[in-house]
Amino acid sequence: MSLNYEIRVRGRVGEHLADALGLAAEVEPVETVLRGPVTDQEDLHGILDRLQELGIELVEVRRLPQSP
C-alpha cells in the first residue's frame, strides 16, 4: 500500500524531474510542490536523496491524509 506525500522544495522543478521521481509538480511563485504516491520509507528516502544530490533545497515533507 502506498501513501500520498507532499514534498515542498525551494525554486522551480520541471516536469521531467517530477516524472522521474514518480510525482506530480505544481509550481508556485518561490516553491515547487511535488505530490504523489510513495510506496514505503525506502522509496521516500530515495526521493529525498535524489533531491539532495541535485542540490535542491527541501522546505517541507508531509504525508497527506488518506481518502475515505
Image (tube, grey):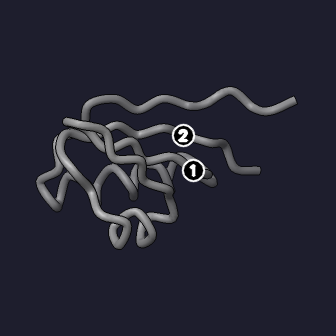
Which residue of the protein is positioned furthest toward the right in this rendering?
68
Q: Position of residue 38 (x, y in %)?
A: 58, 51
In what element is the residue under mark 2? strand
**Residue pushed farthest left?**
55
Residue at x-position 40% and y-position 62% = 18
In the rendering, at what x and y percent does residue 30 appear?
19, 36
The picture quadrant where one finds residue 28 is top left
- Judging by the rendered image, the residue that carries numbered circle 2 is 5
Give left or right: position of 50 versus 55: right
Q: Position of residue 49 (x, y in %)?
A: 29, 55
Where is 67 relative to 22, above or below?
above
Spatial CA distance of label 2 from label 1 is 6 Å
Q: Is residue 23 above or below residue 60?
A: below
- Neighbourhood count class around disc 2 (C-alpha, 10 Å): few under 14, some 14–19, many 20 upward: some
The residue shown at (61%, 30%) is 64
Q: Dividing the image into 4 quarters, which one contains the C terminus?
A: top right
Viewer-closest of 2 and 22: 22
Residue 65 sits above or below residue 12 on the image = above
Q: Which residue is mark 1?
A: 36
In the displayed structure, would residue 66 be above or below residue 46?
A: above
Label 1: how many Cα within 10 Å (few below 14, some 14–19, many 20+):
some
Give the structural element (helix, strand or loop) at label 1: strand
Tell me if 54 is positioned left or right of 35 in this view.
left
Image point (47%, 49%), residue name: 44
Side of 52 where 1 appears, left or right: right
Q: Among all residues in the image, which is located at the extreme front?
A: 29
Instruction: Name the one closer to the observer, 48 or 27.
Output: 27
